[in-house]
Amino acid sequence: MSQTKDMTIGNPSKLILAFGMPLLAGNLLQQLYNMVDTIVVGRGVGVDALAAVGATGSINFLVLGFIMGMAQGVSILAAQFFGSKDYQRLRKSITMNIYISIVVCGLMTVLSLLFTKDVLLLMGTPETIMNDAVSYIQIIFLFMSVSYAYNFLSGILRAVGDSKNPVIAMVIACIINVVLDVVLVMYVHMGVAGAAYATVIAQAFSALYCLWSYLKIKELRIEKEDWELDLPLLKKSFFLSVPVAIMNSITAVGVMVLQAGVNSFGTQHIAAYSAGSKIMVLLETVGSTFGYACATFVGQNLGAGKTKRILKGVNEIAFVMGVFHIVFGIVLYFCTRTFLGWMIGSSEVEVIELGVQYMRIMYIFLFVLALLWVYRCSLQAMGDTVLPMVSGIMEFFSRIIFTMTLPGLIGFDGIAFSEVSAWCAACTVLIPAFYYRVKKAKEYKL
């Protein structure tokens, strides 16, 4: 098991940081190649096309977030079984989740293709960008199994302590995506469809690399008997995953309402929000990456019965992430205009200024988002996916209430404040819930 990592021994914070750094590199690359879509579409096709791609962000999160949530059960159980050295049940949990995945992926593909345009209309997507928006997102949805396969396999690799091969997969995907983006959009003139196909093809190569890496770990190689139906384990995987999927979907619906609020301002505001959101996703990657690193650490140590290590490791990482994001937010506050100019083009002055207006509010609360990821992922890794779902419900209602009120009172700034209010609401549930759950950890049985 040369690529795996036992996180039940050694200094907790050093282990989490060392494990998370390669993941961070890979996830940043993933977000960078998503930003390439924005840059190529914005500069190569135009602001309307950029707005079209941006207008699909929340519906993309709704559908793909749901199926990614359904894959969460496998990484939670894989980390726990790896920590307890129960490799037979580890393999069994993977096959049971494959059964779940086939059904979920097939159903969601059909439903998403049928109702994409209806949802975009419901969100108030402007008619001028509707065709491009539908074209882009339906290609992504048609091949959602590709994205699912990558996330499923990379989740297993991370759970057993392999943070390097998912990064290599992302490097491969990034290179392929950048090349195909330029070729299909700039030279073949496929417009937003070209950007969508570039993303899908790149993800396919990253999934294949993760599969190759998975097959090299002999303890994970599935045998014939591992495919035999284990109803208790299937049920456990399903009920671990469903709350995560629901949480992702509820959060996505809140983001869709937020997007509808943005849409009411017009195309320039949509383009500014789209570009700003791309930067925001890039920044969020730091918090989410170390949240997932914490999840591997927590899951393995829960499996090994080392609850004091869980508390120590999460406390240390929460402190490091909080301080880092406060400092990082201050630095970025003064650089936003430059970043947006690179993405949109310096001639789009009004769009850039709207983006600056949105992003500077987000930076102030960046540390809250980092804490949200650390505590949410840690709770999920302990087998508690219900309270994180409750936090998602809190996010939903906060976004809805403030999106319906603040923009009318303070204009476009209300969109940013509606978003950060959701982060704060989620943390009021997640932080106390984690410390309560640690006290009860000895009652959890694999």
Image: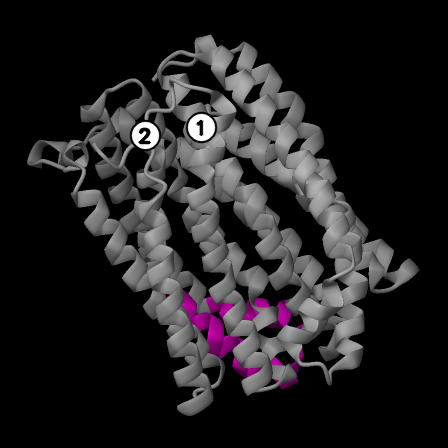
The span picked out in magenta is 115-142
Residue at 22% x, 47% y: name it. 213
Image quarter of residue 392: top right
Q: Is residue 338 above or below residue 24?
A: below
Q: Residue under circle 1? A: 15
- Kind of residue sitting beneath label 2: Lys
Out of 118 and 210, give the one closest to the viewer.
210
Mark 2 Cα-neighbour bin, 10 Å: few <14, some 14–19, many ≥20: many
Residue 243 in sight from this viewpoint = no
Q: Are marks 1 and 2 in contact (CB under 8 Å)?
A: yes
Residue pictured at 73% horizontal, 41% vertical: 326
Looking at the picture, how far across and down is residue 242, in whole percent?
A: 44, 38
Of mark 1 and mark 2, the one earlier in the sequence is 2
- The image shows residue 406, relative to residue 96, as above or below, that is below
Mark 1: amino acid: Leu
Residue at the location (46% across, 20% down)? 11
Query: Which quadrant is home to the C terminus?
Result: top left
Which numbered disc covers residue 106?
none
Residue where numbered disc 2 is placed: 5
